[in-house]
Image: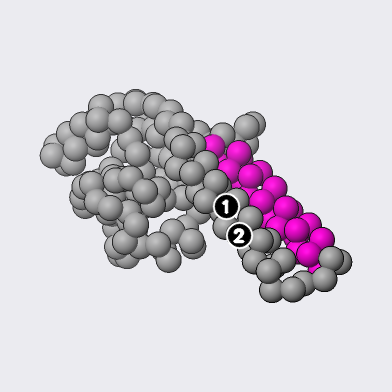
């Protein structure tokens, strides 16, 4: 199959903001219990400073992640996934359509440890599309969030090959 298809998907920031609020509340609780266990004023000030820095770093990470856009392209026999952050364009995955074994929706949270090591961040909250493929004899998989039109084109190419 020789076709060209291109789409961009923006990350939903709501789950990240919810996690940031929960993280902030937990830091407030740590600060509160720090005063209850009898820390000196200097120790409490240092603890509050460290907790504030952690929250600011987490907030920066949430803003950076929510600005990411993923571009999915089908060009000839290749499925190409790019991560776009500002002006930076990073190739995440390039898979030949003929190497794809299956596409299915499954809960991506079942492989949390695998998501830590992956350069393609998986959504641990909602259902994602799992793409299983063969790469140099090894079975590999990744999660992504394509539109239904993109899935139809990939499935059509799987049926014709």
Vertical placement of 96 versus 8: above or below? Answer: below
In the rendered image, which residue does mark 1 sit on? 25
Quadrant (top left/top right/bottom left/bottom right) for the C terminus: top left
For mark 2, give the secondary structure. helix
Residue 16 in sight in this render: no
The x, y position of residue 99, in whole percent, is 27, 50
Q: Which of the 4 image quadrants contains residue 160?
A: top left
Q: Are marks 1 and 2 in contact (CB under 8 Å)?
A: yes
State the residue in front, 143 or 73.
143
Magenta span contains residue 60 = yes
- Pick the residue in front: 13 or 120: 13
Label 1, secondary structure: give it: helix
Q: Could you tell me which quadrant the N terminus lies in?
A: top left
Q: Which residues are magenta?
A: 43-66
- Work out whether 44 lies above or below 25: below
Crowdedness of circle 2 by 10 Å Cα count: few (<14), some, many (20+)?
A: few
Estimate the x, y position of residue 155 in percent, counting from the top left.
Answer: 19, 37
How far apart are the alpha carbons under marks 1 and 2?
Answer: 6 Å
Toward which corner of the image does residue 134 lie, by quadrant? bottom left
- Residue located beneath label 2 in the image: 29
Question: Image check: 81 left or right of 44?
Answer: left
Tell me if I can see residue 52 in this picture. Answer: yes
Residue farthest along the right direction in this orientation: 42
Q: Look at 28% across and 53% down and name the residue there.
A: 107
From what the image shows, is residue 137 above or below residue 107?
A: below
């Amino acid at each position: 199959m020789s076709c060209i298809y291109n789409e961009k998907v923006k990350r939903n920031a709501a789950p990240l903001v919810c996690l940031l609020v929960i993280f902030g509340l937990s830091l407030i609780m740590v600060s509160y219990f720090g005063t209850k266990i009898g820390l000196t004023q200097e120790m409490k000030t240092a603890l509050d400073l460290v907790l504030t820095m952690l929250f600011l770093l987490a907030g920066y990470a949430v803003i950076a992640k929510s600005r990411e856009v993923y571009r999915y392209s089908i060009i000839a026999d290749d499925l190409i996934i790019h991560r776009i952050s500002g002006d930076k364009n990073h190739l995440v995955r390039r898979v030949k359509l003929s190497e794809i074994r299956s596409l299915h929706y499954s809960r991506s949270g079942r492989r949390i440890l695998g998501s830590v090591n992956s350069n393609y961040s998986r959504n641990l909250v909602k259902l994602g599309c799992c793409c299983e493929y063969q790469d140099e004899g090894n079975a590999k998989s990744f999660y992504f969030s394509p539109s239904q039109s993109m899935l139809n084109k990939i499935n059509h190419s799987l049926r014709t090959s």
